[in-house]
Amino acid sequence: MDTPVLVSEQEYLHSSYEPDCDLVDGRLEERNVGEREHGILQGQLYHLFFIHRNEWRMRAFPEQRIRLATGRYRVPDVAIYKDPAPRDPVFSTPPFIAVEILSSEDRMSRVRRKIDEYLEFGVPYVWIIDPQTRKADVYTPQSIHEAKDLILRTEDPRIEVSLEELFRALDE
């Protein structure tokens, strides 16, 4: 999107975009989605959290609008909430994990801005998954690290997600 599209918060909340957009200070920001690998990983993550929902006491929401502040909405690829998950049409509480799956058009400067916003909002874990390199990074308020052992982890509750298993779906 070369020219920023300006919309009010009310207009944003009462409109639908295909794919959905982020709203940042009155400007619509397109999200890079739609590539095969992106869709597969998003589906795999949702499925994994769905089948473990009772064990982990978590709920996954693909492409859920989240209000970070007045005039600022982000739509993570997958937002994962501890039970009980919010029931509002647009969430205004931080997810436990915000997942962004990189697309070939993503620029790290823009992704880093999202990561910083999620962490400032109170998201304990931000997972950035790159289907091209088959690597992932974990961002927390205290640290940034690559999941070198190909396991994405959280504490309290303890969750482990095998990247190897997720990436295997890209080859099927």
Image (cartoon, grey):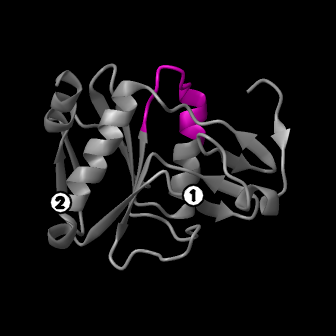
Residue type beneath disc 1: Arg
**Residue 14 horizontal side relative to residue 129, left or right:** right
Q: Which residues are magenta?
A: 101-113
133, above or below 86, in the image: above
Q: Where residue 102 sits: x, y (%)?
A: 44, 30
122, above or below 150, in the image: below
What is the quadrant of the N terminus in the image? Answer: top right
Dot 2, crowdedness within 10 Å: few (<14), some or many (≥20)?
few
Secondary structure found at label 1: loop
User: Which residue is rendered at x = 58% and y = 40% of the image?
Assistant: 19
Q: Where residue 117 sits: x, y (%)?
A: 59, 51
Circle 2 residue: 51
Q: Is residue 135 visible?
A: yes
User: Does residue 104 belong to the magenta stretch?
Assistant: yes
User: Which residue is rendered at x = 48% and y = 77% of the image?
Assistant: 87
The foreground one among 94 and 54 is 54
